[in-house]
Image (cartoon, rainbow, N blue to C red):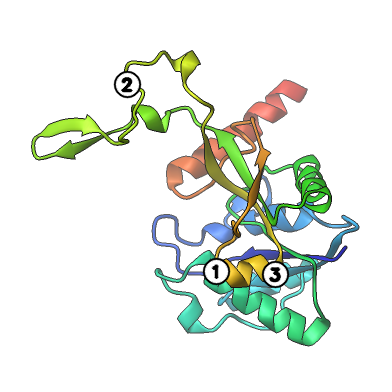
């Protein structure tokens, strides 16, 4: 099986400027995502899609495949991950042949483990489902969510569970951003990294599920690293 690992890293982050190459634990953030999938047999290439030459050069020196810079029209605030993934997949398959799956790894998930990546690939290989998605159990259940109607609060969901005990609520999950694996056919058909049928790669660890989007998230990542060091002393 041939799986293309794709890491997307545009330069225009507004909430945390320069986050993709900000130093975490002594190395640029994006290298955490490159290093975790090196030497996994099913991964045929680690392709980085970026509009930034500095990011491209850092990734190339780490062994990633960066044959081109992403066009400006695919590096805006409104560009979707699916747009970028399809563009990268089309160019890669034109140059190097077809693949069986596309694995999107966001560079903002530095603590995903090699074990979780391999577990997700195994799910993909043995299942008839067309996509595997990294998820984490929700701490705030959606059936307890509220919204405003005029000046008043009302249940967000029609079939809410506001009177239910937490232990009686059905399991719910949120997308943690660490793992998206989909067949090329599903990605192109649905223009979605979830495809039409999706299996969960359930990740319980709050540390592994961290998605760095703000300064507070980055500080939390530094705390996790410091705590890990302290616990090994």
The percent coordinates of residue 130 (x first, y second) are 69, 57
Q: Identify the residue position indicated by label 1 in the image.
A: 191
| Residue 67 can be seen in this image | no
Callout 2: SS:
loop
Q: Is 197 situated left or right of 2 in this image?
A: left
Neighbour class for label 1 at 10 Å: few (<14), some, many (≥20)?
Answer: some
Secondary structure, mark 3, is helix
Q: On screen, 1 above or below 178?
A: below
Q: With 94 as the anchor, is 219 left or right in this view?
A: left
Q: Quadrant of the C terminus?
A: top right
Cα separation between marks 2 and 1: 35 Å
Quadrant for residue 6, please give it: bottom right
Quadrant including the N terminus: bottom right
Name which residue lies at 43% across and 74% down.
76
1 versus 73 height, above or below:
above
Q: Which residue is mark 2?
A: 162
Label disc, if present, on residue 184 of the rendered structure: 3
2 and 1 marks in contact (CB < 8 Å)? no
Q: Position of residue 112 (x, y in %)?
A: 69, 44
């Amino acid at each position: 099986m041939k799986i293309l690992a794709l890491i997307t890293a545009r330069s225009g982050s507004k909430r945390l400027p320069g986050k993709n190459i900000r130093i975490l634990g002594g190395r640029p953030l994006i290298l955490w995502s490159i290093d975790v999938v090196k030497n996994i047999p099913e991964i045929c290439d680690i392709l980085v899609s970026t509009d930034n030459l500095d990011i491209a050069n850092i990734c190339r020196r780490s062994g990633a495949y960066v044959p081109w810079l992403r066009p400006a029209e695919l590096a805006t605030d409104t560009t979707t991950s699916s747009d970028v993934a399809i563009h990268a997949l089309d160019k890669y398959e034109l140059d190097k042949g077809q693949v069986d799956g596309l694995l999107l790894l966001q560079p903002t998930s530095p603590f995903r483990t090699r074990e979780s990546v391999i577990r997700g690939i195994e799910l993909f290989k043995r299942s008839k489902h067309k996509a595997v998605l990294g998820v984490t159990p929700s701490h705030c259940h959606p059936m307890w969510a509220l919204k405003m109607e005029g000046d008043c609060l009302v249940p967000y969901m029609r079939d809410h569970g506001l009177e239910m005990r937490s232990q009686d609520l059905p399991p719910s999950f949120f997308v943690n951003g660490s793992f998206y694996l989909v067949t090329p056919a599903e990605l192109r058909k649905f223009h979605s990294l979830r495809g039409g049928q999706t299996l969960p790669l359930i990740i319980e660890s709050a540390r592994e599920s961290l998605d760095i989007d703000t300064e507070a998230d980055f500080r939390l990542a530094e705390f996790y690293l410091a705590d890990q060091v302290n616990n090994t002393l």
